[in-house]
Image (spheres, grey):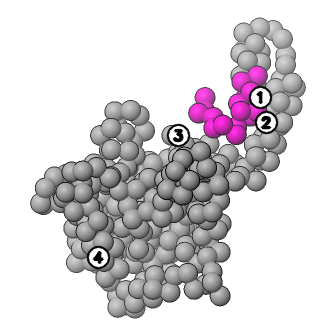
Amino acid sequence: MHNFLDFEKPIAELEGKIEELRHISDSGDMNIAEEVTKLQEKSDRLLRQSYARLSAWQKSQVARHPDRPHFNDYVEQLIEDFTPLAGDRAFAEDHAIVGGIGRFRGHSVMVIGQEKGSDTNARVKHNFGMARPEGYRKAQRLMEMADRFGLPLVTLVDTAGAYPGIGAEERGQSQAIARSIEVCLGLKVPVISVIIGEGGSGGAIALASANAVIMLEHSIYSVISPEGCASILWRSGDQAKEAAEALKLTAQDLKLLGVIDQIVSEPLGGAHRGTEKTITAVGNAIEAELERMRGKDGTVLKQQRRDKFLGMGQKGLS
């Protein structure tokens, strides 16, 4: 039923037994409902205990879970009349970044985010959510369109990072990311960003230079992946667990450091165990932030956003 992570093996065994007992119960006259109830309570208790003390590395695994809701899931549930807008008007369409106009709870918005894909074909099509320069240039075009028409901008971040291929570098990957950050910081409309899974390096901050940065409880946000950090510092990926702890990449650490503004709780066992509930909670958080910013002067919003990032780190250092 679920894709279980390494640390969830005891839970997987219990849930396997529960399914076996239910199958026996369904196929015969034996009443074993009481035994199933006991095992279910034990499974829930173990799940609660496991997720109450997740390490940074385990949170990284949860953030990357293949069943975690992706950009398209959020759009389908939260955005009405979504009209995707494609192309950077210079080179090509990048499917890793998806964006368009729609209505969020009665208000027109521009929505942009990375889509990883939910099966093998979709993952290949969307390049596992790793955008090339044309993806970031498309994002810039849509950000400027939102600014021109006074549409609040909502970004949903879920990427391991920008695509590091030779072609992407030849077409100006770093310049495209830097320009996206610059455009984002210069907008005079409300900008709200939600880290829904992985927030990897410049590939994430290109869409997350927002007035309000929100993270799901078990998402991660970092300058580099734990594996990448370990390969640089220790010349081996074996120390990824230690790197994850040192990077302070969890939502809880980043809230203390003042890098993000809000944490949205996930259902017991992670967002992949309660997709609809998670998406609704994210929608409520976005709505509250939009309401708080509604009516504010564009110059004030722009200055608040710039001050926020220029002062980043001061809260954690003081």
Q: Residue furthest top?
A: 28
Q: From the image, tell me which residue sits under label 1.
A: 14
Left/right placement of residue 103 relative to residue 171 reads right
Of the residues shown, which amino acid type is indicated by label 4? Val
Pick whichever, 64 or 163, lies toward us.
163
Is residue 3 in the magenta section?
Answer: yes
Q: What residue is shown with label 3?
A: 67
At label 3, which amino acid type do we have? Asp
Helix, strand or loop at mark 4 = helix
* Mark 1 to mark 4 CA distance (whole Å): 50 Å
Relative image position of residue 93 (x, y in whole percent): 19, 51
* Residue at mark 1 to residue at mark 3: CA–CA distance: 20 Å
- CB-based contact (under 8 Å), mark 1 and mark 4: no
Give 260 or 78, whichever is nearer the viewer. 260
Give the amino acid type for the residue marked by disc 2 in the picture: Ser
Q: Quadrant of the N terminus?
A: top right
* Point 63% across, 80% down: residue: 316
Q: Is residue 244 left or right of residue 180?
A: right
Please check the rendered image and state whether residue 105 is part of the magenta-colored stretch, yes or no: no
How far is the residue under mark 3 from the one under mark 2? 20 Å
